[in-house]
Amino acid sequence: MTLSRRELLRGAACGFGGLALDGLMADTNAASNRRAPGGPHIPPRAKRVIFVFLAGGPSQGDLFAPKAYITRKHGQAIKSPVGDDGQLRVGVAQFLPMAPVKPVRPRGQSGMMMSDLLPHLSGVADELCLLRAVVADNKAHAPAALQFHTGHIAEARPSMGAWLGYGLGTENRDMPGFITIHPPGDGRTYGAGFLPAIHQGTPLRVPRQTGEVAITNLRDPDPKPELQRQRLDFLQRINRRLLNRVKTDSQMEGIIESFELAFRMQAKTPGLVDLSRESKQTLEMYGIGGGASDVNGRACLMARRLSEAGVRFVQVTIGGWDHHGDIRNALPGSCARADQPIAALIRDLKRRGLLDDTLLVVSGEFGRTYWSQDLSGTSPIEKHGREHQQESFCTLLAGGGVKAGLVHGETDDFGYRPVQGQVHLHDLHATILHLLGIDHERLTYPHHGRDYRLTDVFGRVIHDILG
C-alpha cells in the first residue's frame, strides 16, 4: 500500500507520540506539569520510599518471630491448626512443627527477635519497626505479589510507586518518579494501570561491568545532543498540532512526557549508576566486591543514590526466598545475599541524614508456615521446607516517621492467625501514603465510571506505629 506524504506524517505523529511535550509545557506553565510536586493532604513525615521486595516469601518463623510451642514440638505431628478451610495444602498433611534453622535471639536495646543468619540487620535492630501480623489475601506468588504492589490480586491497577508519583509528583524533573531495580517478571507490579503512563516504573539493572547498560533503549545512537534536540523539537511541533486537534489524551500525553524525560535522563543517569564514585569504605559496607552480597549490595547502593537524587519511589527486588524444600541449607544463602546490603542501606541513609524522611519497607509477598513441607513425602524433616502463608507474616519498616525499635502485632502459638495488631495490606498501603502526607481516601482517579484508589474501599492508618 502506498501512503501519501500527508498520510505518512499523520501516522508518524501518532506513532511518535512518545516524544516531546513535557519540557515545552514545563517551561511555559509549570502548574500544568503532571510531574510537578503536588500538595500533600496532611503534613508529611517522609518525602520518599525505598521498597526492598523479598520475592518468594521469606520465613518469618526462622528470621523474626519464633514460637516456643513450635520449637518444643519440633518433628512431632500436631492437630491441624488451620481447621477445615478447604484449601489445598501439598506436602503438609502431617503438620510437623519445624524449629528455626538457626537460633533467633533478642537484639539491641529493643530486644527485637532476629536470627543469627542476619548479623548485619541485628546490628540495626533499634532502627527497625517490625510488623509481625501482616495479612494478605492469596497464597499464590503472582496474585500475592500483585496485591502487595497494587492492592489487587488480579487486575492491572496502578502500583504503589505510580500512585505516589501521581499524588506528589517528582522531586527531580530530570529523573523518573519511580524506578524499579531488578524488577519482578510481572510488569503489572510496576505499571501505571489507568493512570497516565508517565507514572509507571522505569526498570533498571545495575551494571556489573564496563559498557553494560543500566536502562535499555535510553541511549540514542547519535552522540550529538543538538541533533537529538532538533529532532525532538520537530516532533514536538507535530504532536502539539495533534493534541490541539484531539484536545485531550492522557495516555498519549504520558508517553510524550516519557520520551522528553528520556532525553534529559541521558545526561543525568550515567553519573547516578556509576558506583565507582563511591568510597572503598562505602562499597565494603554494602558487601560489594564479588561475594554473595555483591549484586544486591550494588542494587541497594543504587537505591540510595537514586533516592538522594530525588526519585520519589525506588524498589529493589531480591529473589530467592521460595523455600519449599531443604530450607535448612537454602535459607543461609538467601540471607547472606540480602542481610548486609539492607543493613548497609539503613546505616548509609542515617549517616547522610536521609533516614528521617525516607521510608524503608522490606517485605515478601507473604510468609511461610511454621510447620514443614515435604513435597516428596519421603524426606527426613532435616530436608523439609515450608509452605506459603498469607494468613500472617512479617514486614520491616524503618525511618520515615515510624517508631524505631518497635514490635507491632502478634500471632497465635502456631504462628498462624493474628491475635493482636493485625495489619492487612490495605492498612499498610494506607499507612505508607499517610506517612508521605496523603489521605488514602482522597487520592483517587476516575476510571470506568467510578473513583479508584490504592486501598480501594478498604484500609486504615496504623497510628500505633507512627513516631
Image: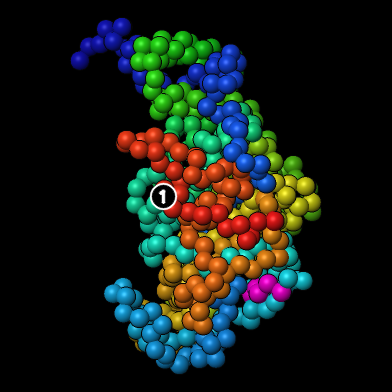
Residue type, mark 1 in image = Val
Residue 193 position in % (x across, y down): 40, 39
Image-based side of 233 in relation to 4, left or right? right
Image-based side of 155 in relation to 235, left or right? left
Image-based side of 116 in relation to 252, left or right? right
Residue 285 position in % (x across, y down): 74, 57
Residue 255 position in % (x across, y down): 44, 27
Image: 182 above or below 312: below
Q: Is residue 374 visible?
A: no
Residue drawn at (72%, 44%) of the image: 276
Q: Give residue 378's quadrant in the image.
A: bottom left
Circle 1: element type: loop
Residue drawn at (58%, 13%) of the image: 28
Q: Give the range drawn in magenta.
A: 111-115
Mark 1 Cα-neighbour bin, 10 Å: few <14, some 14–19, many ≥20: few
Is residue 225 covered in magenta?
Answer: no
Residue drawn at (35%, 38%) of the image: 450
- Return the residue at label 1: 457
Q: Nearer the viewer, residue 289 or 47?
A: 47
Task: Name the chief secondary structure element in magenta.
Answer: strand
Q: On the rendered image, what quadrant is the N terminus found in? A: top left
Residue 246 position in % (x across, y down): 35, 15
Q: Which of 431 and 360 is in front in this view?
A: 431
Q: Give residue 241's quadrant in the image.
A: top left
